[in-house]
Image: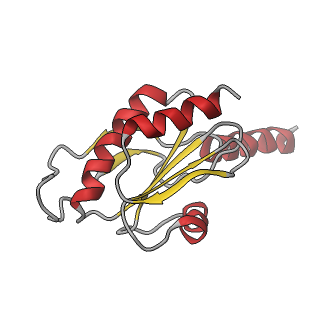
Amino acid sequence: MIMRKTAIVLVFLLLSSFGFGIDNLKLNPKLDYASDSLDGPLITGDDSQSGFVAGKPNYVIIYGEGCFNSKRQARRTVELYNKYRDRVHFVVIDLDVPRSPEQQKLVKQFYKGYIPHVVVLNVRGESLYNQSGEVDSERIEEIFNSSINR
């Protein structure tokens, strides 16, 4: 009986740490969008070390804290999160802090050396968008909407 309860608790802990993604995304209010100043993490949230989650589209942003292009893309990311958080899993990878093994796998697979880098993956982990540089929210929304409605 004790072993069964222990197993149930372990399964719950594993599911809660890997099954849910980053939540409560917030933009750093001190960001200076006109410079490459180091303003700290661009985006914060709960479970910020999450990686790919199967079963829903994933939006991945890879950025550096001192990049003004990354700061603008971070603002778009939080806006997209506020609109799609129930239907899309968001992964935020800050290259200036240690990453989880799941995030390191995504960096190795998709990152091309330029920031910001945005990847949108379908429910199976296949790339629907994989580009460096800023991308308009409208373009990402088109991809989200086509992958959510499949």
Question: Between 52 and 24, which is closer to the camera in this rendering?
Answer: 52
The image quadrant of residue 21 is: top right
Q: State the image coordinates of residue 90 (x, y, percent, origin top left).
A: 50, 43
Residue under the point 47% across and 39% down: 140
Residue under the point 48% across and 29% down: 84
Q: Is residue 143 above or below residue 101?
A: above
Q: State the image coordinates of residue 16 (x, y, percent, origin top left).
A: 63, 40
Q: State the image coordinates of residue 148 (x, y, percent, origin top left).
A: 63, 29
The image quadrant of residue 103 is: bottom right
Judge left or right: residue 27 versus residue 126: left
Q: Is residue 63 above or below residue 17?
A: below
Residue under the point 38% across and 42% down: 77
Question: Between 13 and 65, which is closer to the camera in this rendering?
Answer: 65
Instruction: Give the tally of numbered discs.
Output: 0
Q: State the image coordinates of residue 4 (x, y, percent, origin top left).
A: 86, 40
Question: Between 98 and 126, which is closer to the camera in this rendering?
Answer: 126
Q: Is residue 63 above or below residue 82?
A: below
Judge left or right: residue 30 versus residue 58: left
Residue under the point 32% across and 65% down: 64
Q: Is residue 3 visible?
A: yes
Q: Is residue 41 visible?
A: no
The image quadrant of residue 123 is: top right
Quadrant of the snapshot with the C terminus: top right
Quadrant of the snapshot with the N terminus: top right
